[in-house]
Image (spheres, rainbow, N blue to C red):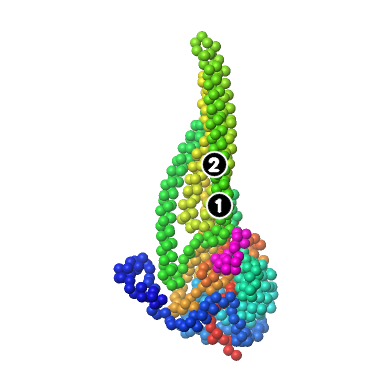
């Protein structure tokens, strides 16, 4: 670090100005606190610890489980201890936020507390939720979420009595069982943690948080296979790069079958099967009008291609501009010291790559072999057509030798016979040649149609919207070029023949060229949680804050407090039929609902479902409908995630005697 600082100090003013102009801020090591080797070793151990150490002091301080009647007073006691723990400026900020929330009747107060948690202000979130629980002591969702917040913040000893009370009243609730397990885990009692987590997993096999923590416990015991199995259950419905990396470290290589990808691939997303083209002539009479029809068809294809080429140029420029904006956003995020973030990859790129890359990858050489087979097959067709042409020419020469001497003044002039004989030879050539060409082209077009559709479907999830539009246009150009360049053989009528007027009438201009189906994201979902709004499309996830006249500004800068704490939210749109009593459960599938999952780096999963018992799959909308979860009616259940170190509440937090 000293050597690095020396190099930076020696930079010329010109170099420093250039770096500034590029938006690159030079780091400094001058004000880094002194640390010794023992402190570094301890920090390294904390950072890499799989499970927390057993905290005997906090375990022994856990109060008795309150009765139903005494639960409100217990929550008041916890909140009072929490308020006493907060620094004065943090306390005044939290109270100001709570008063502002109370005055805004358009938003749900408890969901607003959760939105503070989501935006990285857990101390304010806990304060508001504690006040709300005192105002409405009968709201089980709020009490459960309050206990979950206390657990994730580091006050598991205060959360356990609340959770045990709720679990006694609402047995078999996967959210409560998970949260109790996570609380015991945070206190270092792995035996109790494992029992409750196992219970949550028995109710909901793919419980994301319970399985993740179960995996950590098994890994800490050296049970690698059990750790892998639990992590696979965690990632099955809720993929994240963090889980994938964990599995890789455990020695498990993920495959597509290990994760769910909920969006069924449409059979023909671009509408390629709707395109038609003229037939392949088998007789000279057909050839006359089909040759003209093919000419018109190719002209229409070429006109469409020219329009697409112009559009491709425009999209390419938009793509470059979008890339520059994303690059600038990455630079700003890297220079902000973690205060701002950006979406580095399209939303579903990692899981789509894992699940769908087989559509376009050629790891086994299948596509390469297909190309070779296709080239060889076409070479055979060309050889046969050449052979058929030579046979036709030879036959016509013989006919010419036979009939030409008979044509002229004073001669028999068997014109009709001559005409029919030549036409018969040419019909035979067209029949044999176009049969082979058409069969080859049909197979080629079907293979390419499937490949283009696969590539477009895959591209929708691994590319940004601007890139995808460019890919779509080029896919359309590829298809039009393919069908335009078909090469049927044509033959004119024989000598001394007259054109069939009825056939001539069949020469019509082609109808308008079939339009492509528009491939746009059909999976949209959005949720409003308090004053936070989330919008999710196939490749893009966006979160915004809609606070109206309420402006909340933190007046302190604390890296410990201003951070995103991993967890997941289970959302249901009402307390209607189909939703069991007690907190919203992780596996709930009733009416309209969803799930938002995140870790300390990113939002990882947005799941939405619609209709009783019908899951819309991990992450996204149902069918081609847009699903809107409104904040006023939404019930939210927080599922606590595992946390080994870095709690925002220190051991100085206690409930007193």
Image point 50% across, 39% down: which residue? 484
> Residue 364: x and y, percent?
58, 52
Whether residue 58 appears in magenta in the rendering, the answer is: no
Who is closer to the viewer here, 145 or 76? 145
Crowdedness near tag 1: few (<14), some (14–19) or many (≥20) residues, C-alpha within 10 Å: few
Describe the element under mark 2 as helix, strand or loop. helix
For residue 251, above or below residue 401: below
> Residue 425: x and y, percent?
57, 24
Start and end of the magenta stretch? 238-259
> Residue 21: x and y, percent?
34, 66
Residue underneath mark 2: 375
Image point 55% across, 38% down: which residue? 378
Image point 56% across, 36% down: which residue? 381
Which circle's residue, 1 or 2, is located before the other in the chain?
Answer: 1
For residue 605, above or below residue 269: below
> Residue 489: x and y, percent?
53, 32
Who is closer to the viewer here, 613 or 102? 613
Q: Is residue 583 visible?
A: no
């Amino acid at each position: 670090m000293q050597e690095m600082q020396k190099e930076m100090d020696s930079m010329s003013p010109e170099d420093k100005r250039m770096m500034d102009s590029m938006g690159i801020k030079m780091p400094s090591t001058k004000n880094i606190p002194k640390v010794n080797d023992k402190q570094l070793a301890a920090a390294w151990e904390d950072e890499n610890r799989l499970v927390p150490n057993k905290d005997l002091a906090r375990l022994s301080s856990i109060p008795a489980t309150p009765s139903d009647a005494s639960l409100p007073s217990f929550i008041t006691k916890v909140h009072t201890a929490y308020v006493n723990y907060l620094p004065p400026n943090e306390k005044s900020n939290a109270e100001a936020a709570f008063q502002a929330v109370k005055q805004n009747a358009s938003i749900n107060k408890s969901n607003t507390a959760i939105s503070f948690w989501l935006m990285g202000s857990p101390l304010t979130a806990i304060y508001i939720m504690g006040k709300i629980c005192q105002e409405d002591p009968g709201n089980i969702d709020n009490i459960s979420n309050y206990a979950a917040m206390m657990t994730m913040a580091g006050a598991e000893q205060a959360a356990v009595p609340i959770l045990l009370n709720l679990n006694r009243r609402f047995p078999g609730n996967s959210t409560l069982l998970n949260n109790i397990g996570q609380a015991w885990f945070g206190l270092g009692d792995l035996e109790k943690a494992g029992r409750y987590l196992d219970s949550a997993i028995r109710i909901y096999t793919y419980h994301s948080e319970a399985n993740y923590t179960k995996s950590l416990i098994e890994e800490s015991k050296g049970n690698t296979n059990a750790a892998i199995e639990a992590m696979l259950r965690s990632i099955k419905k809720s993929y994240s790069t963090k889980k994938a990396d964990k599995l890789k470290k455990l020695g498990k290589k993920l495959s597509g079958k290990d994760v769910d990808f909920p969006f069924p691939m449409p059979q023909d997303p671009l509408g390629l099967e709707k395109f038609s083209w003229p037939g392949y002539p088998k007789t000279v009479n057909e050839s006359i009008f089909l040759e003209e029809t093919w000419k018109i068809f190719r002209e229409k294809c070429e006109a469409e291609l020219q329009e697409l080429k112009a559009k491709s140029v425009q999209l390419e420029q938009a793509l470059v501009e979008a890339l520059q904006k994303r690059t600038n956003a990455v630079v700003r995020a890297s220079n902000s010291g973690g205060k701002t973030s950006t979406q580095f990859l399209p939303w579903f790129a990692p899981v789509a790559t894992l699940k769908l890359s087989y559509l376009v990858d050629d790891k086994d050489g299948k596509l390469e072999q297909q190309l070779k087979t296709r080239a060889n097959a076409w070479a055979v067709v060309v050889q046969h057509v050449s052979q058929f042409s030579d046979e036709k020419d030879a036959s016509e020469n013989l006919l010419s030798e036979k009939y030409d001497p008979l044509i002229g003044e004073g001669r028999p002039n068997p014109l009709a016979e001559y005409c029919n004989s030549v036409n018969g030879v040419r019909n035979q050539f067209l029949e044999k040649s176009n049969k082979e060409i058409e069969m080859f082209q049909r197979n080629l077009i079907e293979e390419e149609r499937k490949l283009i559709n696969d590539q477009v479907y895959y591209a929708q999830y691994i590319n940004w919207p601007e890139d995808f539009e460019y890919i779509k246009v080029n896919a359309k150009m590829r298809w039009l070029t393919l069908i335009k360049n078909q090469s049927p053989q044509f033959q004119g009528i024989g000598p001394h023949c007259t054109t069939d007027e009825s056939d001539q009438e069949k020469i019509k201009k082609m109808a308008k060229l079939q339009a492509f189906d528009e491939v746009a994201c059909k999976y949209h979902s959005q949720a409003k949680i308090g004053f936070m709004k989330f919008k999710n499309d196939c490749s893009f996830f966006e979160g915004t804050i809609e606070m109206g006249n309420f402006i909340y500004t933190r007046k302190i800068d604390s890296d410990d407090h201003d951070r995103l704490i991993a967890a997941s939210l289970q959302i249901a749109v009402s307390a209607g039929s189909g939703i069991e009593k007690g907190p919203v459960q992780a596996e709930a599938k009733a009416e309209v609902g969803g799930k938002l999952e995140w870790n300390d780096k990113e939002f990882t999963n947005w799941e939405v479902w619609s209709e009783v018992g019908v899951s819309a799959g991990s992450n996204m909308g149902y069918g081609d409908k847009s699903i809107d979860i409104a904040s006023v009616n939404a019930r939210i259940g927080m599922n606590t995630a595992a946390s080994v170190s870095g709690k925002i509440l220190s051991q100085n937090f206690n409930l007193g005697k």
